[in-house]
Image (spheres, rainbow, N blue to C red):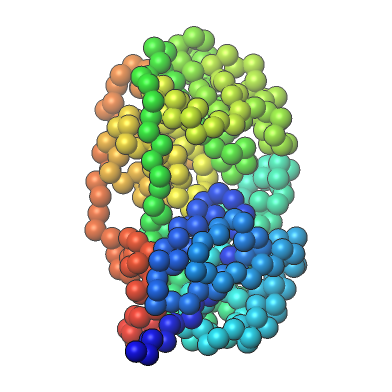
Amino acid sequence: MEQPVRKHLVVSAVNIRKGGTLTVLRDCLQYLSTRQDLEVTVLVHSRSLADYPGIRYIEIPWSIKGWLRRLWCEYFTMHRISKRLPETELWLSLHDTTPRVRAKRQAVYCHTSFPFLKVQARDWKMDPKIPLFAKFTKYAYKIGVRRNRYLIVQQEWFREGLSQLVGFPENRIIVAPPQFQPVPAVGEPDAIPLFFFPSSPDCHKNFETLCRAAEALENEIGAGRFKVALTLRGNENRYAAWLKKQWGHIQSLDFHGFMSKEELASYYGRAAALVFPSRVETWGLPISEFKPTGKPMLLADLPYAHESATGAAQVAFFGVNDFQQLKDLMLAIIQQNFTNFVQIMPSEPHLPYADSWADMFEKLLFDEDSSAR
């Protein structure tokens, strides 16, 4: 009996190395490795990052050595590769940019929220790569974007913002919330209220608003009444060193440093509340990880936090730079006053929406809606 012809699909992910984007790549390829009806080719800088059976790999190790090489890879190398490959039904780029390739359909998974970062003067001093990257990605998203049948994002606010930024119709931007492995909280809350902010020491994470709030609160009620744990030590980069120099004398601040998953689970259990003041996020993973505890969360009043907190039992929002408002909310938790905390109720998602990779590829490969052409 003649075997049906398998559709050929390409996934390009040459710039992915770590973090949430690597999780997306692995989840995507793990699913595709189960599809017997698809012939899958994957472009990566190293196969060892995500090696799954039944998939053809093309390694391009030099693609991660700077942005100029990355762009050359996207617009010249991939074009040559696409001409040598079998006829491609779908080319899915998992890292923000639209490559110049031969394919019946193209789609791009857009991770980077930096185009929506409100750059501050201090960012240029602390880490100029971040404001430069924010400016660059505004233009990188636009290059060739109309070649795509769909764009993919993780949140509704990102869909709306990206549509306006690049002039791409919202009904061709799929919202696909990421799937997370839970980090179960271990143990009971400390006797002295502990406020916890787990994050990398990057200047857009906005540790300074929390540090200022802790300083103001300690000046108001004294040391020994609360603790704030930070996942930076103060020697990681220029920003971390500045934070330690400015607020290292505050007794209530614990510059703990990087935490393993086991330590993270312990601190989720010990914490009285999560604080998350970041100025921009694609999602905000600690919000999702902490949410099952049912304990209070103090979040920056920004669209990503409102969406990530959906379903949370006790949430209060503060102005992203308003340390006085954050200080007052921290004091309310110490005093067991939850008047300003609310439950965030789920809402019906807007279409197009995908809650699994199976649902995603059904849309990407087989959607015949004329509006998406």
Q: Position of residue 9 (x, y in %)?
A: 49, 77
Q: Position of residue 204 (x, y in %)?
A: 59, 44
On the image, which quarter does residue 82 sit in? bottom right
Q: What residue is drawn where x is 64% and y is 71%? A: 58
Q: Is residue 363 above or below residue 269?
A: below
Q: Position of residue 142 (x, y in %)?
A: 57, 73
Quadrant in which the C terminus is drawn: bottom left
Quadrant in which the N terminus is drawn: bottom left
Query: 320 or 172: which is nearer to us?
Result: 172
Can residue 102 be seen here? The reply is: yes
Q: What residue is drawn where x is 49% and y is 69%? A: 54
Q: Position of residue 277 (x, y in %)?
A: 49, 38
On the image, which quarter does residue 5 sit in? bottom left
Query: 217 or 256: which is nearer to us?
Result: 256
Q: What residue is drawn where x is 50% and y is 22%? A: 228
Q: What residue is drawn where x is 37% and y is 21%? A: 187
Q: Is residue 290 above or below residue 191?
A: below
For residue 234, side relative to residue 159 (left or right): right
Q: Is residue 26 above or below residue 152?
A: above
